[in-house]
Amino acid sequence: MRLNQTAEYALRVMAYLATQDNQEPIKSKELAKTTGIPLFYLSKIMRRLVVAGLVQSQKGHGGGFTLAKPRSEIHFIDIIQSVSSEFSTKRCVFGYARCGDENPCPLHPTWKILRNQILSWANKFTLEDVAKGEPIELPDDVV
C-alpha cells in the first residue's frame, strides 16, 4: 500500500479548504501558493476532486473552489481514492500475484495488520477532524 504524491497533495489541499471558515471560493492560484502545490499539478487534482463530488468549482469573477459536502461527510479515504488508482490495499509487498491468507508472502501477516490500521484511519477520520485543529487521537493499538 502506498500513498503517492498526488494523494498527499489532495489531502493537503482538502485540509486547507476545510480550515477556511468563510467557505468563500478560493482561486487555483491562491490554493497553489498557499499549499505549495504546482499550479498545473493542482489543476489536475482539483478536476478529479470535482468529478468525485468532493469539491465544487465556480467559474468567472469571484469563482474558485469550495467543499461540495459538509466537512464531516468527507473521509480521508474518499479523498485518497478519488485521485489515486495506486492506493491498493490488496497489493503484495513482495509483488506476489496471488498473495493472501491462503498463499501468504513472508510479510503478509504483519502487513495485513498495518494495512487494516491504515484503512481504519482513512475510513474513520474526516475533514471535520482536521478543521477542529486538534491533534487526531489514534487508537491505542495503532503504533
Image: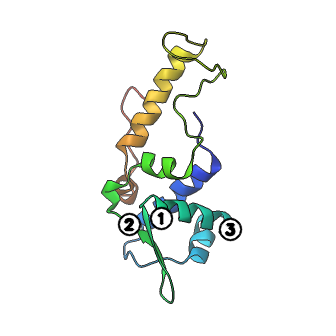
Marks 3, 1: nearer the viewer: 1
Residue 41, image quadrant: bottom right
Residue at x 47% of width, y 34% of height: 118
- 8 relative to 90, above or below: below
Residue at x 47% of width, y 52% of height: 79
Question: Pointer 3: what residue?
Answer: 40
| Of pointers 2 and 1, the one earlier in the residue sequence | 1
Question: Pointer 2: what residue?
Answer: 68
Q: Amino acid at mark 2?
A: Ala
Q: Amino acid at mark 1?
A: Val
Camera-side residue: 77 or 133?
77
For the view shown, which residue lies furthest in the bottom direction? 61
Mark 2 in CB contact with mark 1 (< 8 angstroms): yes
Q: Amino acid at mark 3?
A: Phe
* Residue 125 position in % (x across, y down): 37, 46
Residue 105 visible to an observer of this rendering = yes
Q: SS at mark 3?
A: helix
Camera-side residue: 86 or 132?
86
| Of pointers 3 and 1, the one earlier in the residue sequence | 3
Q: Quadrant of the N terminus?
A: top right
- 37 relative to 110, above or below: below
* Residue 110 position in % (x across, y down): 52, 17
* Residue 31 position in % (x across, y down): 56, 71
Q: SS at mark 2?
A: loop
Residue 143 visible to an observer of this rendering = no
Question: Pointer 1: what residue?
Answer: 50
